[in-house]
Amino acid sequence: MQKHVTDMRGLQRKLLLMGSHVDDDMLGKILLTSVKEAFPTTVKILRSRELSPTLDQITNRLLAKEDEMKSRTTTKRKADDGQLLYTGKPDKNRPFKKQVVKDKCHYCHKIGHHAFECRFKKRDFAKGISRMCIPIEGEDQINILQHDDDDEGFILATTDESP
């Protein structure tokens, strides 16, 4: 943009040497017309003012707009450099495949599902049994059993040791 303004000033001087005088207001209008495609919004704003802006105001505004656009594109490039681009195959529609869960269920202690999917938990809930988990043989467990009819509960402590 700075080079373009300098070239326009050079043309103004050449025309002055040839005997044709182009004042700064006219040069400002010519400059706005020449950059209308690159900065359409800025040109519209500058032309819509009641008092026509001076050549210095026009050049300052256009240079600031150019710097703003350059800084915006460089920050976008910096962000893009650090990102990873992943493209899949959009032409092939793959059927949905359920993810295999490698975690252990906290209710029945089996591998392959979570407690909210556990069929044993759903079965116990349907029977009215509410407990934290199913006891494991060989481990000391404390389970809380609760009936739906009354709010009273009781604690059942199970141990592997025989009396």
Image (spheres, rainbow, N blue to C red):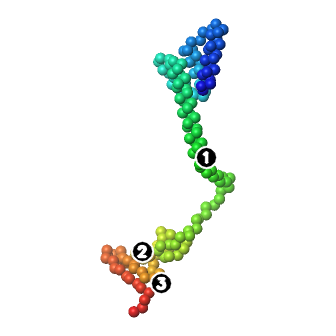
Position above or below: 32 against 120 = above
Q: Counting other residues with Cα less than 10 Å from the Cα at mark 3, is it few (<14), some (14-19), or many (20 or more)?
A: few
Residue farthest along the top direction in this orientation: 19
For the C terminus, the quadrant is bottom left
Q: CA distance from mark 3 to mark 2?
A: 16 Å
Q: Earlier in the sequence, mark 3 or mark 2?
A: 2
- Mark 2 lies on residue: 132
Residue farthest along the bottom direction in this orientation: 163
* Image x and y of residue 123, in percent: 46, 75
Q: Secondary structure at mark 2?
A: loop
Q: Counting other residues with Cα less than 10 Å from the Cα at mark 2, is it few (<14), some (14-19), or many (20 or more)?
A: some
Q: Earlier in the sequence, mark 2 or mark 1?
A: 1
- The disc at residue 81 is 1
Q: CA distance from mark 1 to mark 3?
A: 56 Å
* Image x and y of residue 126, in percent: 43, 74
As shown in the figure, which amino acid type bears the numbered disc 3?
Glu
* Image x and y of residue 149, in percent: 33, 75
Residue positioned 59% across, 65% down in the render:
98
